[in-house]
C-alpha cells in the first residue's frame, strides 16, 4: 500500500497532470478503503493541491515490466506518444520501411541499430531533389565477369566484357554486353535498368558509394569487376571525395580470339555481289551539288525557239541526278519544272531496250535439270556506266538522254566541295548561251471598237476571257489628284470656231485634268437663249481624224495639246482656247510646258531678230514707250505675233517681264470685306498686333516671312479666310510681306470707307476671264537679256 503525501501545495499548478498520475497509481497499486476515503475528501476540498503534493513520491515509482506498461518507461513527464508508420508505397509497390523508423515518442526501439549517415559532406546551397540535381548524369564503367564453361577441355571459363551504367537520378543500374558477330551467346542488354538490391539483404540497394574502379559488384550472382571509367565518372567521383582506383585492361578472352581467327579464314563458296551504300548515305546525306546549265534546241527541225535554262542536282548520298527547268513567265509553256526525275544517269543514253533476262542482278547457271548455281566469274554480265561526281565540272557537256546539257556555273557549296576533295580551284567563268533576238516583232492587232462603253472597255475585253473593267493607274491618280489648294486642273476659256455670230458669242470652260481627262462646261448666261451647263462629260478625248471602229490604237489629247491659241476638237466641235486662269499659267510655267518655257521663247525671239529687223522693232518700241521706260502690253502683242509667237508664248513673256498688274481692284475689294468683318467683331487690338509684328521683325526691315505673318494673324484670331489671305499676302508662299502695308489695309479705325457692296460680298464668278490682266511690259529688260 502506498501512502500519498498531499501536503505539497507548491505543485498546485500541475493539478491536471497529477490527477492523471494518481489515477495511474491507483490503478496499478490498489489502496485501502481508508486511503480512498481520504482521497475523496481531499478531492472535494482542494483536489489540485492534494494531488500535486504527491508528485515527488509518485515520480520515483517504477512500473512493473508487464504487458501494456513497456511503452511508458520510467519518464513520467513524457508528453509525446506518437507511433510512426512502418509501411509505405514506392513505385506502386507496398513496402516495409520501418527498419530505421523510431519507436513510440521518437525513441529508439529495443535492438535498433544506429542510423547510417553518408560519408560525404553535405552540399551547400538550396537543396534539390535527386531527379533534378542529377538529371541526365550517368556513371559509366567498363568491366567484365567470368563465366564457367562446363564440359569443355579447351577452356575453363570465358571473359565476358560488359558496360555498367549507374543513373544518379534514381540509383538504377543497367548492364550491357557488346555484340560480337557469331559469338554464339545472347548478348546485348544483360541487366535491364532498375534498382539492384544488395546481396543477402533484400531491403537495401546499390548506391554510388559501392561504385569505383577496381571494385567488384555482386549482381544477381555475377561478380562484375570494374576495370575503368570515363572522364565524367572520374571527375564526379573525385569531386565527391572518392579516390578513384587505377584503371586496368579487360582480360582477353581466348575463345573470342580463336573464333575471330577462324572467321577471317572462312571464304564463301559462292560470294554474292553486294554493294553497301549505307555508310555513304550516313556520311553524305543532304549534301547536294548544284550546277547551272543550258540546253540549246534551236537548231533542230522542230526545236524550241528559246534556250532551256536547266539546273542539275547531284545527290552525294546515292549518286543520283535530278534536272529541273526554269520556265519563265509568259513563255507559253506549262509550268512543269521537273525536266528529269531523280535517278542514276547513264553516260551513253539513250540505249535500246534490253531483252528479257539480259539485265539481272545475278547470273544463274543451269548445271543440270534439277541443280542451279550462281556464276562466280560473272560471264556475260551487263556493265552500265553512270555519271559520278568526277564527271561533273563547269564547262563540260552532260548527255541527258540525248540532250546536251552544258554546265556554265555552280553554287558556293559545290565550289568548296571540289576544292576540298579534288583540289579544283578554277570554275570558269563560262558564259551562258546568248539568246538570238528576232529581227521581226509581231505587232499586236486589236479588234475594232464595238460601240459598247468606251474604247478602253473593248481593249480590256481582248486581254481576258472574262470581261473586266479597265484598270486605272493608281500611282498616277494619287500623284495628280487634288492636293489641298493644288487642284491639278488646268482651266481654259474657249469659243467655237464658226462663222455664226450667235455661236461665236458662247464661251466655254475646258478643264484639263492632269490625269489625262477632259471636261467641257458652258457657264449659263441669263437671257442668252442658251441653257448652258455640261457640254461634255469628263473622259479621255481622242484626237480628230481617227476611225474609232478600226483596229489601230487610238491617240488621245495630252498636256502638250492644251495652251492658249490651240484648237481642240470635242465630239466634232472645234474649239479655240482663248485664255486660261492664273493657276493654269503658273503651273505650266513651273513644270516646263513647251509653250511656257522662257528659255525657248527667248531663243525663238532671238532667232527672229536678225539684222535690220531688230533695229526696226527696237525703234517701234521706243516710240511707243512710256515715260518710265515701259510699254503697254497690247502694243507689244502685235510685234511679237509678227515674230511667230503663239498666244501662249506671248502671254508667258508678258507675265514674266510685266512691270505692274491690275490686281489693285481685287485687293481693295478684299480689304473692304476684311475691314467690315473686323468692325462687326469689334476688333480693336491693332496696337498689340503692330507691336507683336515689330517684335518679330528683328532686322527692322518692315517685312516678315509669310508663314510667320500667318501664324501671328491666327494667334489674334482675325476672321480672315484662306482665299482672302492669299489675296492680301500674295500667291508666293516663300516671299516676304510688308506687314505695315497689311496693317494699313485692314485697320478700319484709321480709314473711313464705305461698307462693302453686294458685289464685294458675292462669291467670285465661275467664269474665268480670257486672259489675266497685264498692265505694262518692261521691254528694256527683255532687250538687255537678249543682248539687243
Image (spheres, grey):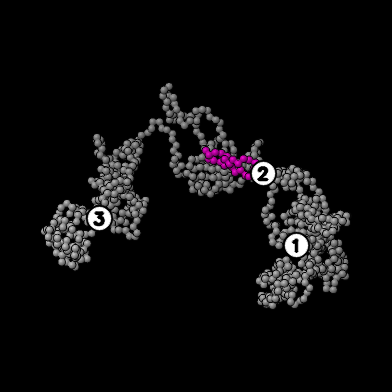
Q: Is residue 52 visible?
A: no
Which of marks 3 and 1 precedes in the sequence?
3
Q: SS for tag 3?
A: loop
Mark 2, residue position = 436
Q: Is residue 766 left or right of residue 89?
A: right
Please say if the residues under marks 1 and 3 sit with CB atoms less than 8 Å apart.
no
Where is residue 274? Give x, y as percent. Answer: 43, 35
- Up the image or down, 788 lies above or below 409; here it is below
Residue 745 is covered by the magenta coloring: no
Where is residue 306? Give x, y as percent. Answer: 64, 42
Q: SS for tag 2?
A: loop
Q: Nearer the viewer, residue 564 or 656?
A: 564
* Residue positioned 44% across, 41% down in the render: 279
Mark 3, residue position = 82
Q: SS for tag 1?
A: helix
Where is residue 435? Give x, y as percent. Answer: 65, 44
Q: Nearer the viewer, residue 335 or 342?
A: 335
- Up the image or down, 268 lies above or below 662; here it is above
Q: Which residues are magenta?
A: 321-343
CA separation, marks 2 and 1? 53 Å
The dot on residue 671 is none
Which of marks 3 and 2 precedes in the sequence?
3
Mark 1, residue position = 583
* Residue positioned 51% across, 34% down in the render: 384
Q: Is residue 370 visible?
A: yes
Q: Nearer the viewer, residue 275 or 755?
A: 755
Are there few (<14), some (14-19), or many (20+) residues within 10 Å of tag 3?
A: few
CA separation, marks 2 and 3? 104 Å
Are there few (<14), some (14-19), or many (20+) residues within 10 Å of tag 2?
A: few
Are there few (<14), some (14-19), or many (20+) residues within 10 Å of tag 1?
A: some
Where is residue 509? Give x, y as percent. Answer: 79, 58
Amino acid at each position: 500500500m502506498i501512502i500519498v503525501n498531499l501536503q505539497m501545495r507548491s505543485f498546485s499548478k500541475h493539478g491536471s497532470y497529477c490527477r492523471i498520475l494518481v489515477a495511474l497509481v491507483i490503478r496499478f497499486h490498489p489502496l485501502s478503503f481508508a486511503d480512498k476515503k481520504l482521497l475523496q475528501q481531499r478531492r472535494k476540498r482542494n483536489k489540485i493541491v492534494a494531488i500535486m503534493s504527491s508528485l515527488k513520491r509518485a515520480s520515483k515509482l517504477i512500473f512493473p515490466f508487464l504487458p501494456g506498461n513497456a511503452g511508458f518507461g520510467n519518464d513520467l513527464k513524457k508528453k509525446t506518444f506518437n507511433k510512426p508508420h512502418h509501411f509505405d508505397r514506392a513505385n506502386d509497390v507496398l513496402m516495409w520501411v520501418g527498419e530505421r523508423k523510431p519507436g513510440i515518442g521518437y525513441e529508439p526501439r529495443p535492438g535498433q541499430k544506429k542510423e547510417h549517415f553518408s560519408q560525404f559532406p553535405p552540399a551547400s546551397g538550396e537543396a534539390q531533389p535527386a531527379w533534378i540535381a542529377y538529371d541526365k548524369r550517368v556513371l559509366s564503367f567498363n568491366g567484365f565477369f567470368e563465366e564457367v564453361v562446363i564440359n569443355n577441355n579447351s577452356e575453363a571459363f570465358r571473359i565476358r566484357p560488359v558496360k555498367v551504367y549507374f543513373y544518379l537520378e534514381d540509383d538504377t543500374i543497367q548492364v550491357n554486353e557488346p555484340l560480337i558477330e557469331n559469338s554464339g551467346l545472347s548478348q546485348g542488354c544483360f541487366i535491364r535498368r532498375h534498382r539492384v538490391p544488395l546481396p543477402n539483404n533484400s531491403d537495401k540497394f546499390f548506391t554510388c558509394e559501392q561504385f569505383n574502379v577496381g571494385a567488384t559488384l555482386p549482381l544477381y550472382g555475377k561478380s562484375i569487376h570494374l576495370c575503368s571509367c570515363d572522364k565524367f565518372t572520374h571527375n564526379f567521383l573525385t569531386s565527391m571525395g572518392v579516390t578513384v582506383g587505377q584503371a586496368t585492361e579487360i582480360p582477353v578472352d581466348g575463345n573470342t580470339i580463336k573464333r575471330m581467327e577462324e572467321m577471317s579464314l572462312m571464304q564463301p563458296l559462292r560470294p554474292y555481289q553486294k554493294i553497301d551504300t549505307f555508310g555513304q548515305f550516313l556520311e553524305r546525306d543532304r549534301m547536294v551539288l548544284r550546277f547551272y546549265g543550258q540546253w540549246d534546241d534551236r537548231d533542230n527541225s522542230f526545236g524550241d525557239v528559246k534556250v532551256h535554262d536547266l539546273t542539275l542536282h547531284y545527290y552525294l548520298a546515292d549518286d543520283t541526278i535530278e534536272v529541273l527547268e526554269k520556265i519563265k513567265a509568259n513563255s507559253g509553256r506549262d509550268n512543269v519544272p521537273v525536266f528529269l526525275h531523280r535517278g542514276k544517269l547513264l553516260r551513253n543514253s539513250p540505249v535500246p531496250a534490253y531483252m528479257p533476262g539480259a539485265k539481272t542482278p545475278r547470273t544463274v547457271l543451269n548445271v543440270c535439270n534439277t541443280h542451279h548455281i550462281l556464276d562466280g566469274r560473272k560471264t556475260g554480265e551487263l556493265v552500265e556506266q553512270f555519271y559520278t561526281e568526277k564527271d561533273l565540272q563547269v564547262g563540260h557537256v552532260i548527255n541527258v538522254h540525248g540532250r546536251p546539257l552544258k554546265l556554265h556555273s555552280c553554287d558556293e557549296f559545290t565550289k568548296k566541295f571540289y576544292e576540298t576533295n579534288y583540289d579544283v580551284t578554277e570554275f570558269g567563268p563560262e558564259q551562258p548561251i546568248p539568246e538570238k533576238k528576232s529581227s521581226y516583232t509581231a505587232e499586236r492587232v486589236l479588234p475594232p471598237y464595238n460601240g459598247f462603253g468606251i474604247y478602253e472597255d473593248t481593249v480590256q475585253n481582248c486581254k481576258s476571257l472574262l470581261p473586266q473593267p479597265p484598270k486605272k493607274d493608281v500611282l498616277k491618280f494619287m500623284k495628280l489628284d487634288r492636293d489641298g489648294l493644288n487642284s491639278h486642273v488646268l482651266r481654259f476659256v474657249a469659243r467655237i470656231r464658226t462663222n455664226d455670230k450667235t455661236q461665236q458669242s458662247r464661251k466655254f470652260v475646258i478643264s484639263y485634268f492632269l490625269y489625262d481627262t477632259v471636261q467641257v462646261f458652258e457657264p449659263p448666261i441669263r437671257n442668252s437663249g442658251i441653257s448652258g451647263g455640261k457640254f461634255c462629260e469628263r473622259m479621255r478625248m481622242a484626237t480628230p481624224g481617227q476611225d474609232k471602229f478600226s483596229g489601230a490604237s487610238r491617240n488621245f489629247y495630252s498636256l502638250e495639246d492644251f495652251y492658249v491659241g490651240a484648237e481642240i476638237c470635242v465630239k466634232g466641235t472645234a474649239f479655240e482656247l482663248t485664255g486660261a486662269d492664273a493657276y493654269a499659267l503658273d503651273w505650266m510655267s513651273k513644270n516646263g510646258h513647251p509653250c511656257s518655257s522662257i528659255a525657248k521663247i527667248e531663243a525663238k525671239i532671238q532667232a527672229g531678230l536678225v539684222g535690220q529687223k531688230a533695229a526696226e522693232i527696237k525703234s517701234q518700241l521706243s516710240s511707243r514707250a512710256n515715260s518710265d521706260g515701259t510699254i503697254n502690253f497690247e502694243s507689244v502683242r502685235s510685234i511679237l505675233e509678227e515674230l511667230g509667237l503663239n498666244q501662249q508664248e506671248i502671254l508667258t513673256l508678258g507675265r514674266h517681264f510685266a512691270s505692274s498688274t491690275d490686281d489693285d481692284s481685287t485687293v481693295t475689294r478684299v480689304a473692304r470685306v476684311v475691314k467690315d468683318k473686323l468692325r462687326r467683331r469689334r476688333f480693336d487690338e491693332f496696337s498689340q498686333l503692330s507691336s507683336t509684328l515689330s517684335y518679330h521683325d528683328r532686322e527692322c526691315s518692315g517685312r516678315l516671312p509669310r508663314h510667320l505673318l500667318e501664324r501671328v494673324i491666327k494667334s489674334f484670331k482675325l476672321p480672315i479666310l484662306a482665299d482672302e489671305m492669299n489675296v492680301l499676302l500674295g500667291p508666293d508662299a516663300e516671299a516676304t510681306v510688308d506687314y505695315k502695308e497689311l496693317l494699313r489695309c485692314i485697320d478700319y479705325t484709321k480709314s473711313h470707307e464705305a461698307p462693302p457692296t453686294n458685289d464685294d460680298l458675292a462669291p467670285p464668278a465661275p467664269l474665268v476671264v480670257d486672259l489675266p490682266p497685264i498692265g505694262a511690259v518692261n521691254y528694256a529688260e527683255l532687250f538687255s537679256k537678249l543682248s539687243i
